[in-house]
Amino acid sequence: MTNHDMQLYCKINNETARLAAAAMRQLGLSTRDYVRVLKVARTPANLANCKNIELIHFTGELQYRPHPRPQALERRLALNVNEIVNGISDPSMRKQEPQH
């Protein structure tokens, strides 16, 4: 499915968009994960003869996404904190304090 097809066939309402944004933050979903959920949610929407993907279709498919491992969440959190504190996203780029 191309980006153009996604825009035509994978439309969601505001309620579903808010839930999707929250899911991306809380579950650590990447953009790729989000697109996959939308594509798969299109199937039950088709079966229900719905023009758009409704909340029930999105949440139904979202529950089948694998949950991130705790280590992955910890690393992502560490990167986010490091980015906020130092303005960088890679811990190896952090300035090393001179050791005396």
Image (cartoon, grey):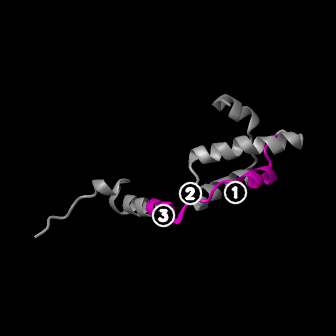
Q: If you read the primary sequence from the N terminus, does the residue marked by circle 3 or circle 2 appear first?
A: 2
Q: x, y (%) of residue 23?
A: 64, 57
**Closer mark to the observer between disc 1 and disc 3:** 3
Kindly identify which residue carries mark 2. Answer: 28
Mark 1 in CB contact with mark 3 (< 8 angstroms): no
Q: Is residue 50 visible?
A: no
Mark 3 in CB contact with mark 2 (< 8 angstroms): no
Residue drawn 48% across and 64% down? 71
Q: Left or right of 15: which side holds 65?
A: left
Please name whichever residue, 29 or 21, is drawn nearer the observer in this view of the structure: 29
Whether 96 is among the magenta residues is: no
Crowdedness of circle 3 by 10 Å Cα count: few (<14), some, many (20+)?
Answer: few
Disc 2 element: loop
Kindly identify which residue carries mark 1. Answer: 19
Q: Which residues make up the magenta segment?
A: 52-76
Q: Is residue 13 above or below residue 85?
A: above
- Please state, as top left, top right, bottom left or bottom right, where the C terminus lies in the image: bottom left
**Closer mark to the observer between disc 3 and disc 2:** 3
Mark 2 in CB contact with mark 1 (< 8 angstroms): no
Distance between the alpha carbons at the discs numbered 3 and 2: 12 Å
Distance between the alpha carbons at the discs numbered 2 and 1: 13 Å
Crowdedness of circle 1 by 10 Å Cα count: few (<14), some, many (20+)?
Answer: some
What is the chief secondary structure element of the magenta stretch? helix
Q: x, y (%) of residue 38?
A: 70, 44
Disc 3 element: helix
Q: Amino acid at mark 2?
A: Gly
Kindly identify which residue carries mark 3. Answer: 71
